[in-house]
Image (spheres, helix red, strand yellow):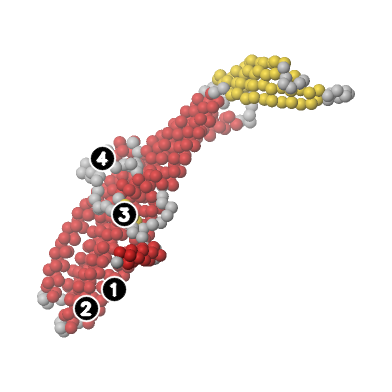
Amino acid sequence: MKKSIFIFVCLLSACLFSCGIAPAEILTWEDCVREAAAMNPDLFSAEAKIRQSLADKGIARSPMLPQISTDLSGKKNKPVGTQEKKDTFAYSITGSQLVFDGFKTSNNVAEANQNLIANQYDYSVVSSNVRLNLRTAFSELLRAQELIALTEEILERRKQNLALVELRYEAGREHRGSLLTARADLAEAEFEVKQAKRNISFAQTKLIKQMGWAERIPVEVEGLFRVSENIINEPDFEYLADSNPFLKELAAKKDAARYGLKSSKSDFLPEVYLNSSAGRTGNKWPPREEEWTVGFSVSFPLFEGGRRISEVSKAEAQVKEALEEERSGRDSIIVTLEQTWVDFQDAVDNVSVQKKFLEANEERAKIARAEYSTGIINFDDWIIIEDNLVNIKKAYLNAQATMLLAEAQWIQAKGGTLGYE
C-alpha cells in the first residue's frame, strides 16, 4: 500500500513538472523592495556612476602628490670618421613636486568632489524613481488579482440572474428580449473573467522586471488597499522642495561648475615645480658614475590661440546653465509636489465616495432582486440596478488602486527612496 502511494505521488509530481505547473511565489511589499534594492539594474548603473566619480576625484588629486618615474637606457654609438664603437648605459630615478599652479588642482579636486556629491544624490533620485515604478507594478498586480476575484463574483451573479429570468420566462411572465439580454450579460461576464486572467500575466512581468529578476516565474502579491501617508495637514512645499534629492543634485552640479570656472581662470597663472633626479651612467653595465640634479621649473604659456580665454567663456556659460537649471528644477518640484498632493487627497476622498455608492447599490440590488422575483418591478428597471452594481464594484476597485498610485507619486515627488518606509 505504501509503495503504491509513493508511486502515485511520484507520477503526480512528474506530471505537474512536465506541464510547467508551479506554485506562485507570494511576495509582500517589503519582499519586493528588498529584491529591487539588491537586483534592479538602474540602481546598479547609478552606483557605477558613484564609483566613477570617486575615481575622477582621485585622478584630480594626483597632481598634488609627488610624481616619480624611473628610466633605464642603453645604446651603442659610432662617431663619424672613426671605427671605434662606444657603449653607453644609464639608469635614473626622477621626481617632481607641484608647488604652485594657481590653485588649479585644488579647484579640480573641489569640482570632482561636487560631481561625486551630485552622483550620490542622483542615486537617491534613481532609487526614488525605482520605488515609484515598483509600487506602480505592485499596485497593478494587486488590482489584477482582485479583479479576477471580482469578475468571478460578477459571473456568478450573472448566472443567478439568468436562472431567475429563465424561470420567469418559462412561467410566461418574461419576454424573450429579457432572456437574451441576461444571456448576453452572462457572456460578457465570462469574457471579463478570461480577460482578467490573461492580463495578470503582464502585470506579473512588470513587477518581475522592476525587481530585476532575470527569470520570469509566477508571482502573487499580498497587501491591502490602504495608505499610510497623512493627508490631514498640508505640508510645507518649500521645505520639501529644498530637501528633495533632485534639487540637491542640481545644486551640487552648480557648485561643480563654479569650481570648474575657477580652474579655467587658474590657467592664466604660472606653474611652479620642484625637480630632482639621481642615477648612474657609464660605458659598462652596471654603470658606476653617479650623477644627480636638483632644481625647479616655471612654465607660463604666452600665447595659445585664445584657447584659455575660450575655456573661461565656456565655463562661465556652464555656471549660468547650472544656475538656471537649479531655479527651473526648484519651480518644477514645487509644482509637482502641489499637484501630486491634490491628486492624492482626491484619490483618498474618492475611495470613500465610491464605497458609499457601493453600499447603496448593494442595498438597492438586494431589494430590486426581491421585487423582480415577485413581479413588483419589470426587467428593464431591475437590470439597470444590476448593471449599476457591477459598474460600481469595478469603480470601487479602480479607485482603491488609483489611491495607491497617487500615494506612490506623492512619495516620489518628495524624493522618497526604496528605504522610505
Q: Earlier in the sequence, mark 1 or mark 3?
A: 3
Q: Is residue 280 left or right of residue 330?
A: right
Q: Earlier in the sequence, mark 2 or mark 4?
A: 2
- Callout 2 secondary element: helix
Q: CA distance from mark 2 to mark 4?
A: 55 Å
Q: Earlier in the sequence, mark 2 or mark 1?
A: 2
Measured as percent of width and height from the top left, residue 182 is found at 23, 75
Q: Do tag 1 and tag 3 residues touch (Cβ < 8 Å)?
A: no
Q: Which residue is mark 2?
A: 178
- Callout 1 secondary element: helix
Task: Give whichever of 329, 154 is nearer the camera.
Answer: 154
Q: CA distance from mark 1 to mark 4?
A: 49 Å
Determine whether 97 is above or below 175 in the image: above
Task: Give whichever of 216, 231 is nearer the camera.
Answer: 216
Q: Do tag 2 and tag 4 residues touch (Cβ < 8 Å)?
A: no
Q: Which residue is mark 3?
A: 26
Measured as percent of width and height from the top left, residue 95 is found at 61, 21
Q: Is residue 360 left or right of residue 295?
A: left
Q: CA distance from mark 1 to mark 3?
A: 32 Å
- The three-letter amino acid code for the residue at tag 1 is Ala
Measured as percent of width and height from the top left, residue 330 is found at 37, 39
Q: Quadrant of residue 388?
A: bottom left
